[in-house]
Amino acid sequence: MDNKTKQQILSKLPKVDALMAEIDIPDCPHSVKVQACRQAIDKARRRVLDGEPEAGSPQSVQRNALALVEELMQPSLRPVINATGVIVHTNLGRSLLPESVIDAMTAVACGYSNLEYNLEAGARGSRYSHVEGILCELTGAESALVVNNNAAAVLITLETLAKGREVVVSRGELVEIGGSFRIPDVMARSGAVLREVGATNRTHLRDYRAAINENTALLMKVHQSNFSVVGFTSAVSMQELSELAAEHGLNVFEDLGSGTLVDFSRYGLQHEPTVQESLAGGADLVSFSGDKLLGGPQAGIIVGKREIVDRIKMNPMNRAMRIDKLTLVALEQLLLLYRDPAAAVKKIPTLKMMCSPYEEQKRRARRFAARLRKAVSEGLTVEVVKTVARAGGGALPLLEIPSAGVSVKGPDDRFSAASVERSLRSTKPPVIVRVEDDSIIMDVRTMADSEFVTAARCIAAATGEIK
């Protein structure tokens, strides 16, 4: 195609106003139409100059404009189907909230609430009172405070109790959490001085004792929630550490990270230290996350002795780290479920997914496979397979949860699992899967029964065959 022909096609491209008149989409904002039409015309111009004359046709330009309107109207943050088998998936939103929590959030979001109003006194109250009582009831703590995440909880605790002074921590507990945030970095930002003791794999009580001096403010223990050191290891228990701290008039702070209120060993899983155990062992203060193993909204929870928690509450940083009303109501409603641990395991999605038996997942996988076989091409092989699910969220790194899933594989080399995986990320809703041995693997442990029909439709679309 010569330049003269290109210029003739370009001269016939529609103007923005004319193209907008051809787009009839109800409730579409004017600004979105303008942006979509401009982009569609610019795209057509580039493609024509690259030697694609058909791109300049009125039908092609209008079709692209409509597609761009739909793309621009779609929110960036949207639901996906998690078929990875990773329960607390950090990239996919971590913990799912129970229905009762969602209902409570909706009720508070739609109207006014007593967020900072004491109904009995008829005067201003504290927003933290809505969760402090239930946290103390469940954990045995004297007082509690909630900030916006556990990193904030650690930061404000260290800034309050140890600014300009030393905090003694085992070298094997200087963990790095998601997003490259490291305990030493958080400590440095707080103004506290890190005093490492012991070795990576072994730390003894005598190491802590030798490190204590007149500038020591705090003994700190950090749970290795996202990794594990095995083999020739040794660590100091909370009880030993608290007794040592008492000898020197110091406090002990434990960062549990993914803290839980449920003993998972009762359900055949690996034991994870609970918040109650840490406090009973002698910790003066414990911090943990709300949106990991607890199964709630993003939050950093601090529980412990009243005198210490009150000092943290008075820190001006608390204002910058405070949680909003929706987080508060979500956390309160979640904690109320923990009054009945057996019911909590059934009603809180994170706990239910972790504790549900393998046989139940196998039955669910069979139902999903049957649905999938009806949706996809007969040339594809659909099988129920045994899988391994993970807790995720930097918690219980060695825990392998026996699970079940469905694999989809093509009849020959023309089937590319990697290509199907990419296509599934563009379906509505996107379906996030695993790829193993050129097969698509979908673990049903992290899928709801209500998602089976939708996932089957998306798989059919991604593999190019819809029946």
Image (cartoon, helix red, strand yellow):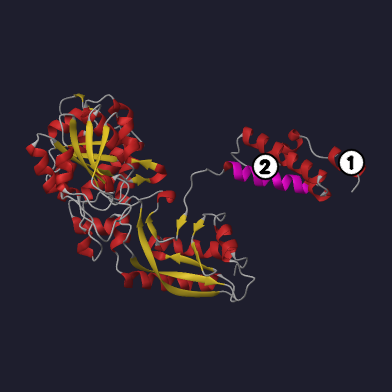
Magenta extent = 59-72
Residue 3, above or below 17: below
Please state which amino acid type lies under the numbered disc 1.
Gln
Residue 427, above or below 170: below
Q: Position of residue 458 (x, y in %)?
A: 54, 61
- Residue 126 in view in this figure: no
Q: Which mark is residue 8?
A: 1
Q: Position of residue 4 (x, y in %)?
A: 92, 41
Q: Quadrant of residue 222?
A: top left
Tell whether 250 sits left or right of 396. Answer: left
Tell whether 282 sits left or right of 190. Answer: left
Whole-angstrom CA distance, mark 2 to mark 1, is 28 Å
Residue 330, above or below 324: below
Overall secondary structure of the magenta stretch? helix
Which residue is depicted at the point 21% across and 53% down?
273
Q: Going from the N terminus, do you reach mark 2 or mark 1 first?
A: 1
Q: Quadrant of the C terminus?
A: bottom right
Please state which amino acid type lies under the numbered disc 2.
Asp
Please count the marks in the image. 2
Q: Position of residue 17 (x, y in %)?
A: 74, 33
Identify the secondary structure beneath mark 1: helix
Foreground label between 2 and 1 = 1
Membership of 66 in magenta stretch: yes
Residue under circle 2? Answer: 24
Which residue is depicted at the point 38% across and 50% down?
94
Identify the secondary structure beneath mark 2: loop
Which residue is depicted at the point 21% across and 49% down?
203
Q: Quadrant of residue 185?
A: top left
Q: Which mark is residue 331?
A: none
